[in-house]
Image (cartoon, grey):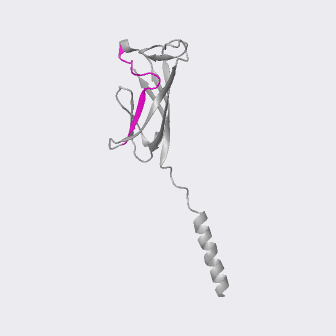
Amino acid sequence: MSRSRKLLLVAVLVLAAGCSSSPAAPKSFTLSGTVTLARGATDAADGVGCTGWAGMGFGAVKQGATVTVFGKDGAKLAQGQLGPGRAPSGFAVPCRFTVRVPGVRAGQGPYRVKIADRAAVTVPEAQVGKFAAPLG
């Protein structure tokens, strides 16, 4: 084999190796989903949505409440907020809040998600990026 053919073969192999690499796993993701109050909710002051009811101990569960994500070692990974509460039935319960927490480090699960002053909920690594939790 001539020298120029050997160089061409090496160049093709190097290019093929560079093209065949698999994409890197994401280093972070956005945890998103819903939190539902099955009880302990009341109509929001705006008359449109719903919110946690302080009389039943859910007063801190409301739009803008802090959502904190912790890793398997207990380290705080990211923080977000609850979106507005909506009651699909037209009544205050169930009251569903959207959750959005950007910048959660991947590979740190199972995750613990704390909503306002409530106990943390565990989210397995397999469910990263999506979240649904009942409160109350």
Q: Which residues are magenta?
A: 56-71
Left/right placement of residue 103 relative to residue 7 reads: left
Q: Considering the image in quadrants, where does the N terminus appear?
A: bottom right
Q: Position of residue 119 (x, y in %)?
A: 34, 28
Residue lying at the far left of the rendered structure: 73
Q: For residue 111, which quarter of the picture?
A: top left
Rendered residue at 61%/64% (across/down): 19
Left/right placement of residue 4 relative to residue 38 reads: right
Dominant secondary structure of the residues highlighted in magenta in the image? loop
Q: Position of residue 18 (x, y in %)?
A: 58, 66
Q: Is residue 11 magenta?
A: no
Q: Nearer the viewer, residue 81 or 34?
A: 81
Q: Considering the image in quadrants, where does the C terminus appear?
A: top left
Q: For residue 116, which quarter of the picture?
A: top left
Q: Position of residue 112 (x, y in %)?
A: 38, 36
Rendered residue at 50%/52% (across/down): 25
Viewer can see residue 1: no
Relative vertical location of residue 24 with respect to residue 71 in this rendering, above or below: below
Q: Nearer the viewer, residue 113 or 81?
A: 81
Viewer can see residue 35: yes
Q: Position of residue 64 (x, y in %)?
A: 46, 26
Q: Is residue 64 magenta?
A: yes
Left/right placement of residue 25 relative to residue 3 reads: left
Rendered residue at 48%/19% (across/down): 95
